Amino acid sequence: MTMSSRLDAGRTAFGITVSIADPFLAEIISSQPLDFVVIDAEHSPLALQEIQTLLIAMRTSQATQLVRVVHNDSVVIGQVLDLGAHGVVVPQVETGEDVRQAVSAAMYPPRGRRGFGPRRAARIGDRKSYLAGANDSVLVVAMIESALAVDNLEAILAVDGLSGVIIGSQDLAASLGHLNDVEHPLVVETVHTIMQRCRDAAVPFGMYAASSADIADLMTRRAQIITLGSDLLFFEQGMRRA
């Protein structure tokens, strides 16, 4: 079951982020029973060639492959989709117009303005089938991680083509004046407000879960996009245990 179908069915999708440019590691990760993998180009030095290599390594994976782009740029979004990503995670979304720009960049005309050149994406399988379903299958996930985004959340959630929302609690905490304090009452309250508005708007949402207790709490709150960790975090945890 694809990530899109899980979200449409009201089910929860579990995944991790990848930021290490090693195709063998990516291949091992993608062999696990994950629903999605996010290649993080925002907080890592990954270049386009390395992103393509990671996507190739994950080709046989059942997981939906997303790329968190460095910023909300139509050229960058088009490039990672042309490389074969199934969708994008867009950071620092703060207005409805930001979402419209991202959706437009991910969609071919007449629904958007994605430039035509599906270099790898249309060559993995059947070119005709890819182009026929590209607009319907692409995922556009917005990162909500600032006080301004919360102020504009109603407009953000109303944009047609938005696939879901990931709450960036660390950036949100910093925006609210509480750097590195995601447990501050104001931050916790704001996160819960975002979740409630997403539920009211029937937009799938989620965030990073630091523990099994966090996973249980998020599922209780009907979160559908839960990030369990990252390649770098797993490496650090293994080193600490050793």
Image (cartoon, rainbow, N blue to C red):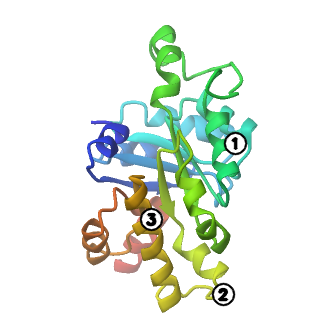
Mark 3, secondary structure of its residue: helix
- Between disc 1 and disc 2, the foreground one is 1
Mark 2 neighbour density, 10 Å: few (under 14) some (14–19) many (20 or more) = few
Q: Earlier in the sequence, mark 1 or mark 3?
A: 1
Residue that label 3 marks: 197
Q: Nearer the viewer, residue 139 or 82?
A: 139
* Position above or below: 198 against 108: below
Q: Give the numbered dot on residue 101.
A: 1
Mark 1, secondary structure of its residue: helix
Spot occupied by residue 4 in the image (x, y as percentages of width and height)? 37, 39
Residue 110: image quadrant is top right
**Type of amino acid under label 3:** Arg
**Type of amino acid under label 2:** Gly
Residue 109 in view in this figure:
yes
Q: Nearer the viewer, residue 166 or 22?
A: 166
Q: Earlier in the sequence, mark 1 or mark 2?
A: 1
Q: Earlier in the sequence, mark 3 or mark 2?
A: 2
- Which quadrant: the N terminus? top left
Mark 1 neighbour density, 10 Å: few (under 14) some (14–19) many (20 or more) = some
The residue under the point 34% across, 56% down is 224
The residue under the point 45% across, 83% down is 188
The residue under the point 74% across, 44% down is 73
* Position above or below: 187 against 50: below
For the residues labelled 3 and 2, the Cα–Cα distance comes to 22 Å
Q: Give the numbered dot on residue 177.
A: 2
**Type of amino acid under label 1:** Gln
Residue 222: image quadrant is bottom left
The residue under the point 63% across, 51% down is 41
- Which quadrant: the C terminus? bottom left
